[in-house]
Amino acid sequence: MSVDVNYDELLERALKLARKGTGFVEPNPRVGALVIKDGEVVGEGWHPEYRGPHAEVVALEAAGESARGADLLIPLEPCSMDGKTPACTDAIIACGIQRVLFAVPDPGPDNGGRARAILQDAGIEVQQLPASDNVTASEVMIADFATYVNGSLPWVVLKWAMSADGKVATVTGESRWISSDSSRTEVHQERARADVVMVGRATVRTDDPELTVRLAETNGHVAVRAVLDSGLHLEPTSKLVESAREVPTWVFHCAGSDAEDRKAALEALGVIVVRVAKGDGGRLDPAEALRHLRAHGLHRVLVEGGPTVHGALLSGGLADWARVYVCPLLLGGITAPGPVAGSGFPSLGDAVWLTDLHLRVVGENGSDFVVEGRIGNHRES
Ligand code: AOF
Ligand code: ZN
């Protein structure tokens, strides 16, 4: 049966699905996929989260037996190498897809341009969709990923919880339980998704956090815990150090030879100590610490404070995404800290803006608000 199918409209639908992964999949690309048979969508899916299944696989599973002889439409060329998940080309071939239509070639050095030959060898027709507004929208959708795969830094997510008057602690420094139980569960899910959970040394001193996943499924994944500690003064009695043999714990510092004893003491307890160069104000250069993480295959970093670390990462242009929990309480006090320290951005023209904004309410009773978005330099027009 020959049916007139508007693939550009279907691409728009795939992009809409892809957008559902925003904030959860990066630095991987947002991808949506449709399985189409006789002009009807018989399966659809999207890449739901970092380390989760690729969109193609979700859509093919949704289609089940109907995938045999069907078209698969995706904004991005399918992957053809085993990575965090098996190659999608294998799944496409195994399901009996007849034709693959995609909008944009993969911009990465591993997968870029490989799928066509593999699929064609298996007797599958491959078509790149002709230029259109939705093809351009597909390019925009994967632009961050394209920059990312060819760069050397990990994707950095800043997360904080603050009162409705913008404070992360009271005037006396109490800070632990500002957000609701539901928000805390979300944070554990975010830790389970991250390759690295990072804090500054001041946060270890004040909160003594464990930074492990206790309120969410991990599927066996364990994130590295990283501490930025310019002077290498991390307390050997902190929970992080005490559990360093069970959970990988890395400390970045830029101290000199006077830190040798402290370094040896931490290493004896199982901490990985990494020296990086000095940056602004005699503190460690956070870019070097981040590059070190990426060089070790760690791509998604969740930063859980405190204000000094947030300030340093924002000033250095090193933060990509902010997830802010706004909680319905007021803490007051001019000296109560806000979430971002450092020297600030002197004029409104220098402000850092969040774009691609997402707003939601967390918890069944609507206890906290989440404001999240891409950290950029310009106001979204
Ligand atoms: C995704 N989600 O839905 C699709 C992707 O990081 P890996 O090993 O899971 O694989 C990343 C590669 O897979 C990368 O080249 C990307 O363009 C391709 N497709 N990635 O994260 C998806 N379809
Ligand atoms: Zn894939």
Image (cartoon, rainbow, N blue to C red):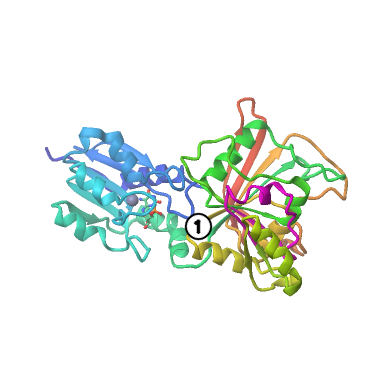
Q: Nearer the viewer, residue 103 or 57?
A: 57
Q: Is residue 120 magenta?
A: no
Q: Nearer the viewer, residue 12 or 363?
A: 363
Whether the residue carrying mark 1 lies under 8 Å from ligand 1 is answered with yes
Q: Is residue 174 left or right of residue 30?
A: right
Q: Position of residue 309 (x, y in %)?
A: 70, 58
Any part of residue 132 in sight: yes
In the image, residue 138 sits, relative to residue 60, either above or below, namely below
Residue at (39, 51) in percent of width and height: 84
Q: Which residues are magenta?
A: 225-251
Describe the element under mark 1 as helix, strand or loop.
loop
Task: Examine the image and state in which quarter residue 288 appears.
Answer: bottom right
Q: Amino acid at mark 1?
A: His
Q: Is residue 248 magenta?
A: yes
Q: Nearer the viewer, residue 219 or 110?
A: 219
Q: Nearer the viewer, residue 332 or 175?
A: 175
Q: Position of residue 247 (x, y in %)?
A: 58, 48
Task: Examine the image and state in which quarter residue 332 appears.
Answer: top right
Outermost residue, front direction? Answer: 268
Residue under label 1, please give it: 299
Q: Position of residue 26 (x, y in %)?
A: 49, 52
Q: Position of residue 42 (x, y in %)?
A: 26, 34
